[in-house]
Amino acid sequence: MSTRTDETTGRAGVRLAAVLAAGAVGVQMAFPFTDGGTLALTAASVVLLSAAAVVHALATRGARTAAVLVVVAGGGGLLAEAVGVRTGFPFGEYAYSGTLGWEVLGVPALVPMAWTMMAWPALLVARWLVSRTVPAISAAGSRLAVALLGAWTLTAWDVFLDPQMVDLGHWTWADPTPGLPGVEGIPLTNFAGWLLVSFLMVGVLDRLVDPGDGPDGVRDAVPFAVYLWTYFSSVLAHAVFFGRPPVALVGAVVMGAVAVPLALTWLRARPVPTPAPEHVG
């Protein structure tokens, strides 16, 4: 296959990923009007966003990367959750209520898909910010920084996700205390477990996914936009529609520590169109 054909196929794949992500945004806009989302809306959102992540990985990095994403994020997320519901490690003791549909190893199938849909943006966002803030860092230092920042990037999302899912009755915690101030009903052990699993997940992805020519603000626009949309829509939803203003405030700070620098550096790096020269004569 020629390079031109590869580039055309890649662009088509990125456009498909953008369409899938846009479809998920449309679905999520209905959440506030259904008391936080029905099973059908939740499933549609997760399926569309996880498909967008895999398609984007395939289009921009190839079939091997897409397979790595599914195995490491989807399989790793399933393994962590299956161990978690049986042993209480590493998230704390919790139980699914059976309201999220078909289960694998006692874990709703939507859950590993949700890990996949956000692990891909977390990896690319972490790579982008590390390359922009510490460009002279060593290779080993860069990998550690990406794993650490990626862990925060992925865990911060759960500050919004877990309260919403608990309020909808999709899972329950045996002992929800102590918790983050303002994020009632979710134990600190949950976020500690997320940091651990996310650190390992992003670290493995960073090692197995070839960085190629580095993070690209145009090529990776879809996962960047997904992360920023998730941030701003989650703040709005919890502040206005879900009756959890304290969660909106805490999440705005925790996830904003990544989302705001991402937005600023990404917008600053976007190419400025050069005006066409005026025709003379």
Image (cartoon, grey):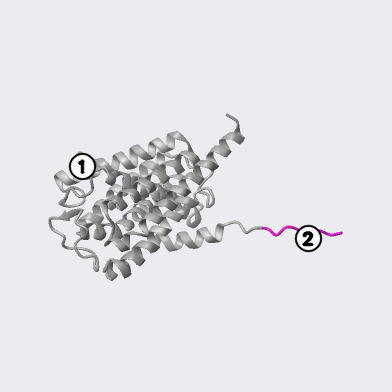
Q: Position of residue 68 (x, y in %)?
A: 38, 37
Q: Nearer the viewer, residue 85 or 142?
A: 85
- Asked if residue 270 lies left or right of residue 109, the reply is right
In this picture, residue 199 sits left or right of residue 165: right
Q: Is residue 247 left or right of residue 173?
A: right
Magenta-span inclusion, residue 8: no
Highlighted magenta segment, given as a residue range:
274-281
The residue that mark 2 highlights is 278
Question: Gap in Å between the C-alphas at discs 1 and 2?
Answer: 64 Å
Quarter of the picture holding the C terminus: bottom right
Q: Is residue 212 visible?
A: no
- Residue furthest toward the top? 1
Task: Kindly identify the amino acid type of the residue bearing the numbered disc 1.
Answer: Ala
Q: Residues within 10 Å of mark 2 (few under 14, many from 20)?
A: few
Residue at x 40%, y 55% (from the top left corner): 25
Q: Secondary structure at mark 1?
A: helix
User: Horizontal and vertical percent for residue 105?
Assistant: 20, 39
In the picture provided, is 169 more to the left or to the right than 273?
left
Q: Which x, y percent locates residue 279?
A: 81, 58
The first of marks 1 and 2 along the sequence is 1
Per the image, the residue denoted by label 1 is: 82
Looking at the picture, tell me which residue is in the foreground, 37 or 93: 37
Residue at x-position 26% and y-position 62%: 35
Q: Residue at x 50, y 41 (%)?
A: 13
Comparing marks 1 and 2, which lies closer to the viewer?
A: 2
At 56% from the left edge and 35% from the top edge, which residue is drawn? 6
Residue 205 visible in rendering: yes
